[in-house]
Image (cartoon, rainbow, N blue to C red):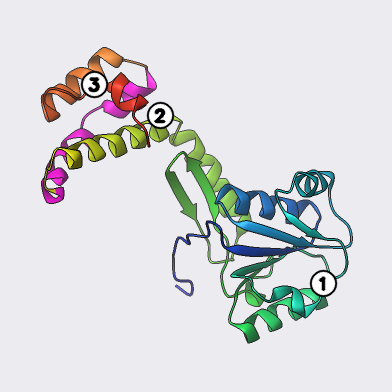
Amino acid sequence: MRYYPIYLDIKNRHCLVVGGGSVGTRKVMTLLECGAAVAVVSPAITRQLRELANNDVITLTQRPFQNSDLKGNFLVIGATDDRELNLQIHAEAERLGLLCNIADHPDASNFILPSIVSRGDLSIAISTSGNSPAFAKKLRKNLEKQFGDEYATFLTLMGNVRKKLLAQNHEPEGHKKLFEQLINTEIIKKIKNHEEEDINKTLLEILGDGYVYEELMQAEG
């Protein structure tokens, strides 16, 4: 395996996308979803990027890329259809020690972007190490059918249960057995089928009094 699997916290970090076409727009949207401070450099841009810039969601520089654009950034994505420009971006990013991904060119990148299944706080990343993006896409579609929105609800529930246990001075190590018991029930299926009464029975059996599904789901994150 060539690539080291990792999840990056890019909240409020400066990230640059070079290229304002459809590919660049997709990259921008993913970065924004993760809380990044996004800048775009490109002579031409999509309408969506223009709207984001007009609403001060992204910083837009509408001109050709310059090496100086990389300064101050944590991460850069090259999303142009100009191979020579992509190689220039990669070389300068390497010189500056930046994280760099060139769309559809893993050999000119020091990290690659996986295909992602996202269900709330559940994130499943699929990678073929750049060998077959099409196969990664097929796997993603299969997993999207297997993992529905109930998994997002389940993780919210588990997170709020954990916070309540910690607030009651439960030892974190003691949570392991409780969560294993919950996971091994059919609680996810019950969430999918909106069986609130049965969910509450499960919570009562494992956690005791005071753990009510409706109240836990309304708790602050």
User: Label 1: how many residues lie within 10 Å, few (<14), some (14-19) or many (20+)?
Assistant: some
Q: Which residues are magenta?
A: 172-193
Q: Quick one: label 2 or label 3, which is nearer the N terminus?
A: 2
Taking the image as shown, residue 21 lies to the left or right of residue 17, namely right
Q: Is residue 131 left or right of residue 62?
A: left
Q: Nearer the viewer, residue 117 or 218?
A: 218
Q: Earlier in the sequence, mark 2 or mark 1?
A: 1
The answer to the question of whether label 2 and label 1 lie on touching residues, with beta carbons closer than 8 A, is no
Q: In the image, which disc is placed on residue 150?
A: 2
User: Which element carries disc 3, helix, strand or loop?
Assistant: loop
Question: Residue flagged by tag 3: what amino acid is it?
Answer: Val
Q: Amino acid at mark 1?
A: Phe
Whole-number angstrom distance, CA of label 2 to CA of label 1: 43 Å
Nearer mark to the viewer, of 2 and 3: 3
Q: What residue did someone put label 3 on?
A: 212
Q: Nearer the viewer, residue 23 or 203?
A: 203
Quadrant in which the C terminus is drawn:
top left
